[in-house]
Amino acid sequence: MTWGRYRVCFDLTAPVIVIDFETTGLSSRRHQITEIGALRLLPGEANAPIFHRLIRQPRKLPASIVTLTGITDDLLARDGVEGGDALRDLVEFIGSAPVVTYNTAFDLGFLNAACEQHSVQVPRRGGHSCALRLARKVWPGLPSYRLPDLSARFGFGLDGTHRAVGDAVRAAQVYRIASADYHNRKISSATRTWSEHKPDHPKPDMGQILREMLRAPR
């Protein structure tokens, strides 16, 4: 299962779904999703619609996961839903919008495995992008690209770290800033190239350059 074509960066002029998962371990084949957090980034709107589900588990959680996330067996038994129901709700929330995760290899690996396990179909795919890869591209040379470290660097705060909604919100904030930097650099590069190679022509229309950059395949 795929989620459409990979894009280095979406331009955020249309809704984008940012997703995060908490899991029982690191292997998408051996471990399970315990919590789903997602939000719909809407152009020009500060308050993003939030999606949240806890998922019941067939066995007790590892003690290390309880310590890391604060998610307990009692919490999942009380507030959790069946995995298939949670995934179908998530697919409906995504709709045809593009998907952004912080670490695509991890997050979409778990999502694909869970959808396969629960026979959940994903009929509409709007493409996907990785906030981690984008951060490495636009901010090379940082000492760490861990989501908590980038969040601290930008002053986002660390409330709800290692919980799906909190991390989805931070991933969205990182992606929004990285996306702006990415597109600003493309515009700057286009202007510099024009200046170097066509010095006798009129100054380019910056609005037109932006429109062309956002239409170009990435």
Image: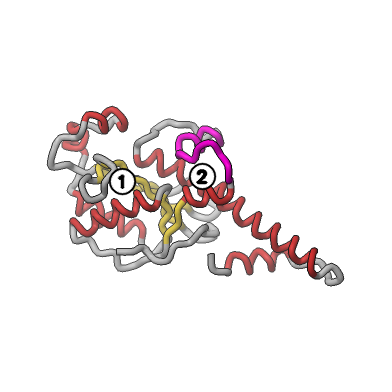
Residue drawn 59% across the image and 65% down it? 214
Indicate left or right for 208 with 152 as reference: right
* Residue lying farthest to the right in this orientation: 200
Residue drawn 18% across the image and 42% down it? 56
Location of residue 159 by image quarter: top left
Q: Is residue 154 above or below residue 204?
A: above
SS category of the residue bearing label 2? helix
What's the amino acid at mark 2? Val
| Residue 60 in the image, given as x and y percentages of width and height | 15, 35
Residue drawn 75% across the image and 60% down it? 192
Q: Nearer the viewer, mark 1 or mark 2?
A: 2
| Residue 92 in the image, given as x and y percentages of width and height | 31, 59
The residue carrying pointer 1 sits among few (fewer than 14), some (14 to 19) or many (20 or more) residues within 10 Å by Cα, namely many
Residue 36, label in figure: 1
Residue 213, label in figure: none
Q: Nearer the viewer, residue 28 or 32?
A: 28
Q: Which residue is mark 2?
A: 174
Q: Nearer the viewer, residue 71 or 131?
A: 131
Q: Is residue 150 magenta?
A: yes
Task: Work out which quarter of the rendered image holds the N terminus and state it.
Answer: bottom left
Looking at the picture, the colour scheme in use is secondary structure
How far apart are the two marked residues, 1 and 2, measured between alpha carbons?
19 Å
What's the amino acid at mark 1? Ile
Q: Is residue 69 above or below residue 201?
A: above
| Residue 3 in the image, given as x and y percentages of width and height | 36, 63
Q: Nearer the viewer, residue 89 or 87?
A: 87
Indicate left or right for 106 with 203 as reference: left
Task: Write the start and end of the magenta stretch as one range.
Answer: 140-154
Mark with earlier residue (1, 2): 1
